[in-house]
Amino acid sequence: MQKRSIVPIVYILFLMLPIYWLVAMSFKTTNEILAGFSLFPQTFTLEAYQTIFTDPTWYWGYINSIIYVTLNTVISIAVALPAAYAFSRYRFLGDKQLFFWLLTNRMAPAAVFALPFFQLYSAIGIFDTHLAVALAHCLFNIPLAVWILEGFMGGVPKELDETAYVDGYSFPRFFVTIFIPTIKAGVGVAAFFCFMFSWVELLLAKTLTAVEAKPIAATMTRTASSAGYELGLLAAAGTLTIIPGAIVIYFVRNYIAKGFAMGRV
């Protein structure tokens, strides 16, 4: 093994250590976790996972999270695609200022919008719904998706559009059948970042839900009992929350690499 390959391997192992520790803790009891240091579970147990998969409070938390995250990703990409196309193909009064304003929404902390969203959604009757959280996350994800997609679209020659029009393509047909497949890498990258932000965001998801659409992150904050926190249960829940993100990363891994190469990720 060459010396230069040792450093990346050690670095990857260092990054994987917290994940391994989380998974190992999920197979331990809370008493064993608090008892002392151990690399492997001394008393292997699946009790925490059994609780998650049999208690509606827990497994519905995952279902709720997946529903509003998927909904948000679809809405964000659907809105960002035409918006990014407009920014990349046309010049209009205030285009640069509008583009910068979109990015400033992404820079703002979620806590700034928690109370306005709460009052607005309560007034129109969509509080504690998946749609409420999905729309709230759009405030942050759509600007990010527009920024990423505009970079990919800018790399597509305008001659492609002109050639399609000469061949008799209408704009909707050209956009769906030719243009979007051309920038599918950008769509994958944008969808990945929208998914990940919405999946890990806690403040808005917790503020805008109560019972019906409560996400898993909010459920995990309510594991305290008279005996303290159920650490094994928290570790198991944390382990399961990693899986959706890992699946998404697996499918868009090549697109993310291309996004880095284009300088927009």
Image: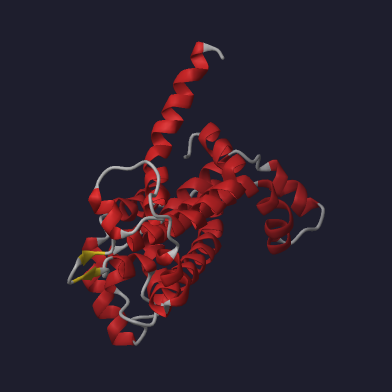
Q: Position of residue 213 (x, y in %)?
A: 39, 78
Residue 68: % across, % down:
45, 70
- Image point (28%, 79%), residue name: 120
Residue 186 in sight from this viewpoint: no
Could you say where residue 228 lies in the image, as x and y percent from the top left? 19, 65
Q: Quadrant of residue 230?
A: bottom left
Residue farthest toward the right in the current orientation of the protein: 167
| Point 29% across, 70% down: residue | 206
Q: Is residue 202 above or below residue 179?
A: below
Foreground pick, 243 / 52: 52
- Nearest to the observer: residue 258 or residue 39: 39
Q: Is residue 2 above or below residue 100?
A: above
Q: Is residue 76 above or below residue 2?
A: below
Asked if one can make out residue 36 in the rendered structure from this viewpoint, the answer is yes
List the single residue furthest toward the top: 3
Q: In screen coordinates, is 169 left or right of 27? A: right
Asked if residue 12 is positioned above or below residue 185 in the image, the reply reads above
Query: At 46% across and 76% down in the image, what residue appears?
Result: 54
Where is residue 240 shown, x and y percent of the image?
45, 59
Residue situated furthest front in the rendering: 43
Work out which quarter of the rendered image holds the N terminus and state it. Answer: top right
Residue at the (54%, 32%) spot, across then down? 261
Left or right for 94, reference 108: right
